[in-house]
Image (tube, rainbow, N blue to C red):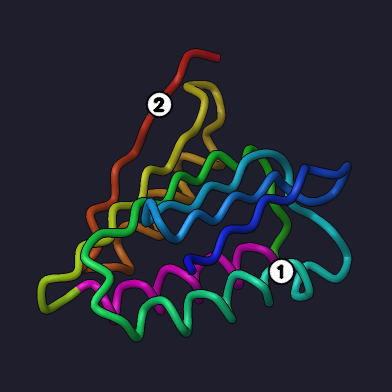
């Protein structure tokens, strides 16, 4: 049985969808909860198990429009973890969604893209 988790967004946490059967994860919304580590723990726990398998392809859509410095660190750690496993026939595609007028998200996506060498990292710009 494949793992599937869907959490609705709150005022301080993003929408989360993990659909293991489809090799898909999505984050969407704002992310600045004071204890965001709890939110990311579920993602980290699942990734530890999933990335240890021969998963083939994982697609991650990140459409977070704002996040705090704690979230920045957790997102980078998640991307670095995925980067270490995107080898040997496993492909990880990260689609970094941002609006054309959100320079901070664009710069952050560019910085993250420089840190990961084994991921397919797509900058996806939408109209403001």
Residue density around tag 1, few if under 14, some if 14–19, many if 20 or more, within 10 Å: some
Stretch in magenta: 70-86
Query: Closer to the camera, 97 or 92?
Result: 92
Q: Which residue is mark 2?
A: 125
Position of residue 29 measured from the top left corner of the image (x, y, whole percent): 69, 39
Query: Closer to the camera, 110 or 19?
Result: 19
Residue 6 lies within the magenta run: no
Q: Residue at x 55, y 14 (%)?
A: 128
Instruction: State the count of labels.
Output: 2
Secondary structure mostly taken by the magenta-highlighted segment of the chain: helix
Q: Which residue is mark 1?
A: 70
Does residue 64 lie above or below 94 as drawn?
above
Position of residue 3 measured from the top left corner of the image (x, y, whole percent): 54, 66
Position of residue 103 measured from the top left corner of the image (x, y, whole percent): 52, 34
Left or right, 98 with respect to 12, comes to: left
Tag 1–tag 2 contact (CB < 8 Å): no
Q: Quadrant of residue 118?
A: bottom left
View extreme (front): residue: 1
Of the numbered discs 1 and 2, the one sitting upstream in the chain is: 1
Position of residue 50 measured from the top left corner of the image (x, y, whole percent): 41, 76
């Amino acid at each position: 049985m494949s793992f599937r988790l869907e959490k609705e967004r709150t005022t301080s946490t993003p929408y989360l969808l993990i659909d293991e059967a489809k090799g898909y994860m999505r984050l969407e919304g704002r992310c600045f909860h004071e204890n965001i580590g709890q939110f990311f723990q579920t993602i980290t726990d699942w990734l530890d198990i999933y990335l240890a398998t021969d998963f083939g392809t994982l697609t991650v859509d990140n459409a977070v429009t704002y996040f705090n410095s704690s979230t920045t660190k957790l997102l980078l750690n998640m991307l670095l973890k995925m980067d270490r496993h995107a080898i040997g026939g496993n492909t990880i595609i990260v689609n970094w969604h941002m609006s054309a007028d959100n320079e901070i998200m664009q710069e952050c996506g560019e910085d993250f893209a420089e840190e990961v060498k084994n991921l397919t990292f797509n900058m996806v710009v939408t109209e403001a």
